[in-house]
Image (spheres, coloured by chain):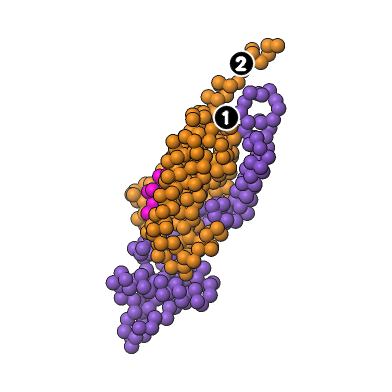
Chain colours: A orange, B purple
Amino acid sequence: MKTKVAWFRAAMAAIVLLRIVLWPFAQLAGTPRALLAPPWFLRWLPGMPPAAVIVAVQVVGVAGAVVAISRRKGAANGFVIAWLAFLFLAGLKTSTGKILHNDVTLLLAAVPLVLHRKDDDDATWPIEVAVVALAAIYFLCGYQKLVHSGLAWVTSDNMRWILYDAAASGRAPTAAVATAIADTPWAAHVTAAMLLGLELTFPVVVFVRKARLPYAIAAATLHTGTWLTLGLDYWSWSLVALVVLAMSSAILAKSTEMKMPSASARSSP
Amino acid sequence: MAALARRAGPGPAPLRRPLIPASRPARAAVGAFLVVLVTCGLLGLELWPFSGFKLFSQLRTDKQVRWELTADGHPVDFSTLPRGYRQGAHVLPTLARGSASRREAACQAWSSVLTAGSRQIWRDPAVKTGGLGVYRVVATSAGPGKPFVERERVLVFACQEPAR
């Protein structure tokens, strides 16, 4: 099975698998209910499930992801199982008090694949809808900055406060990058402007296919910078942007080349 | 969606792959998904994994408001606690607005986890100090990069020492 959507599903399943395996979800076991603020679909839980249950969900999720990556029969169902397991696990993680966005992009960009239940067909809409979802997510991040802070998000000392705070927290692998930018006001303003500009112009990728690869690289650079300066774990956003945008750009362009008749062929009777 | 529909409709490229789902239920599901995604984002609603996407949207200034749990007079570093407790600072405002029974349950949870870490949080009752307290702290700074100085500290609620 080597259709475009099967490859796309396999790549997204690989990211889901990494997220399920690499985070120590079982360590959440035993957190008392009083300290939890679960998302709407987990409010029925009496408390954090025991470690055995969490590990079992991880195993099921990994198995589903492996089937999806294999691109064999049942890959679509395997992906749905992996996605549901990951939704549950990431939901537990975000139940501990803070609304976490680390896994949101992967979960949302994968929804079209959950809705597309055929193992192998010619459809490319799951990839295009994922591009639309991704563009919406980045745009909305920028939009909310404008709603709550306006242009002062760029023109004030906002970015310098963020960076100094991060440098003091010790979360980042080094404080040198954050401090270097924060110590140079114009660099902090340029950083803020580039970040906001990238987010607000992200919908370009929906309409201009050639913009997809540059935006994927820009997004990956942004998240690498976020890790270096703030120490925040957004590598799944980078991978999702690269997979959705770069893959969609490459495989859909190839599809168009292969399937579109030439101009002369179209004009011939 | 309009753009996708336009590209998928009858037109000059009949051999292109459909860019919207072929079946009506799938089209409806995709439409509903995108509507919820955009509505939550525009209105700032949190229906996780749908989100209001307010990441770093609040302006940082020279004034900082933070919530603190103290044990025996010292701030608790949540990052040193078991993983499920590490976002504890974000739970404090919710607990402050919550019921007394939930606060009590939270107090018991903190008490047991801090005691398990061989930490003394309940001093001799005769001294009448120590214990667990939740504070709302306001601090200001003279400028970016300068240290924050505490201006206001309000005890929001205190935990009763559990019966021995």
Q: Main secondary structure of the magenta part?
A: helix
Q: What's the residue type where badge 1 is placed?
A: Asp
Q: What's the residue type where badge 2 is placed?
A: Ser
Left or right: A51 in relation to B156: left
Q: Are marks 1 and 2 in contact (CB under 8 Å)?
A: no
**Could you say which is closer to the camera, residue A74 or residue A241?**
A74
Residue at 51%, 77% in the rendered image = B100
User: How far across and down, in percent of the image, does residue A181 sit?
Assistant: 40, 47
Figure check: B4 above or below B67: above
The crowd level at tag 1 (other Cα within 10 Å; few <14, some 14-19, many 20+) is few
- Mark 2: secondary structure: loop
**Could you say which is closer to the camera, residue A170 or residue A124?**
A124
Residue A211 visible in the shown view: no
Residue B17 visible in the shown view: yes
- The residues colored magenta run A17-24
Q: Residue furthest left?
A: B118
Q: Residue A235: which disc?
A: none
- Find disc 2 in the rendering and name its residue: A262
Whether A21 is among the magenta residues is: yes
Q: Quadrant of residue B122?
A: bottom left
